[in-house]
Image: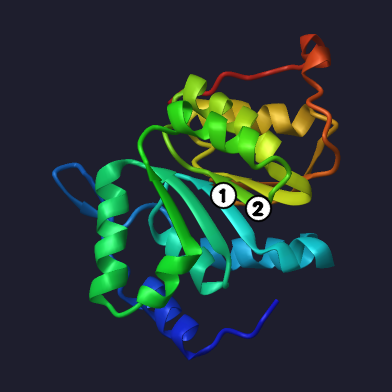
């Protein structure tokens, strides 16, 4: 991968040292669940697992947005994000106010629920992305809907990240990916799992033999 330029280094300094709060819950602004060790893990997996063609692809699809958006941009990825309107607005204001407008041309935000918006995008962009991050709504139906479309959009050889696997929805998806023959495990960091797509088969026809353990939230 390319060596980060000065602007990318400045953006990483912001992410790691003074992260902006793009989210809001528990009655106060929140930076989200990612921290430097998580981003170091993500970058390490991408460096290790992506082949040359995927590295040159440099396209990332993320369900949910936040510090992860800035991080992928700092890696010189073209990032397509599906997230709630208020989060999209805060990221846009950050890029404008903090003089990182150069990244606006690399970012394609879609404001709204991924369950309703992602399907058409996946149909229009099959096998397009080198990596995907599923970190939106953690309900079971949302997570599995997001995965169905991400599977279509992610190219063979690409990496799928699933965050917050301590929640039921992401946990069940991670268990599914462990048993599908179209994905192989390529690491975990705490609540974040990584999987490499090794073929295009959906493999859903043999799920009757799979075993799942429903986690307690």
Residue that carries the numbered disc 2 in the rendered image: 131
Considering depth in this image, is 126 or 158 the residue closer to the camera? 126
| 71 on left or right of 185 | left
Location of the C terminus by quadrant is top left
* Mark 2 secondary-structure assignment: strand
* Mark 1 secondary-structure assignment: strand
Q: Are marks 2 and 1 in contact (CB under 8 Å)?
A: yes
* Residue 151 place in picture, x, y as percent: 69, 35
Q: How is the image coloured?
A: rainbow
Considering depth in this image, is 212 or 48 the residue closer to the camera? 48
Q: Residue at left 63%, top 28%? A: 148
Q: Residue at left 32%, top 51%? A: 88
* Residue 21 place in picture, x, y as percent: 26, 60
Relative to 186, say whether 170 is above or below: above
Relative to 76, say whether 86 is above or below: above
Q: Is residue 51 visible?
A: no
Relative to 121, say whether 206 is above or below: above
* Residue 76 place in picture, x, y as percent: 57, 72
| 154 on left or right of 149 | right
Mark drawn on residue 123: none
* Residue 59 place in picture, x, y as percent: 62, 58
Q: Is residue 5 visible?
A: yes
- Which quadrant would residue 127 be assigned to in this image? top right
Give the mark nearer the N terminus: 2 vs 1. Answer: 1
Relative to 121, say whether 30 is above or below: below
Considering depth in this image, is 48 or 101 the residue closer to the camera? 101
Crowd band around label 1 with a 10 angstrom C-alpha radius: few (<14), some (14–19), many (20+): many
Q: Residue at left 69%, top 35%? A: 152
Mark drawn on residue 61: 1
């Amino acid at each position: 991968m390319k060596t980060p330029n000065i602007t990318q280094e400045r953006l990483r300094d912001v992410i790691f040292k003074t992260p902006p709060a793009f989210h809001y819950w528990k009655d106060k602004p929140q930076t989200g669940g990612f921290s430097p060790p998580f981003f170091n893990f993500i970058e390490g997996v991408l460096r290790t697992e992506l082949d040359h063609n995927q590295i040159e692809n440099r396209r990332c699809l993320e369900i949910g947005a936040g510090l992860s958006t800035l991080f992928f941009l700092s890696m010189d990825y073209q990032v397509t994000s599906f997230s709630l309107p208020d989060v999209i607005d805060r990221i846009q204001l950050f890029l404008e106010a903090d003089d990182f407008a150069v990244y606006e041309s690399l970012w394609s935000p879609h404001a709204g629920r991924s369950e309703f918006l992602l399907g058409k995008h996946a149909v229009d962009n099959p096998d397009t992305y080198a990596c995907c991050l599923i970190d939106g709504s953690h309900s079971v139906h949302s997570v599995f809907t997001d995965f169905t479309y991400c599977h279509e959009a992610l190219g063979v050889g690409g990496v799928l990240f699933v965050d917050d696997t301590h929640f039921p929805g992401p946990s069940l998806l991670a268990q599914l990916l462990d048993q599908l023959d179209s994905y192989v495990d390529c690491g975990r960091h705490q609540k974040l799992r990584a999987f490499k797509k090794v073929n295009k088969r959906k493999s859903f026809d043999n799920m009757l033999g799979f075993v799942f353990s429903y986690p307690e939230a």
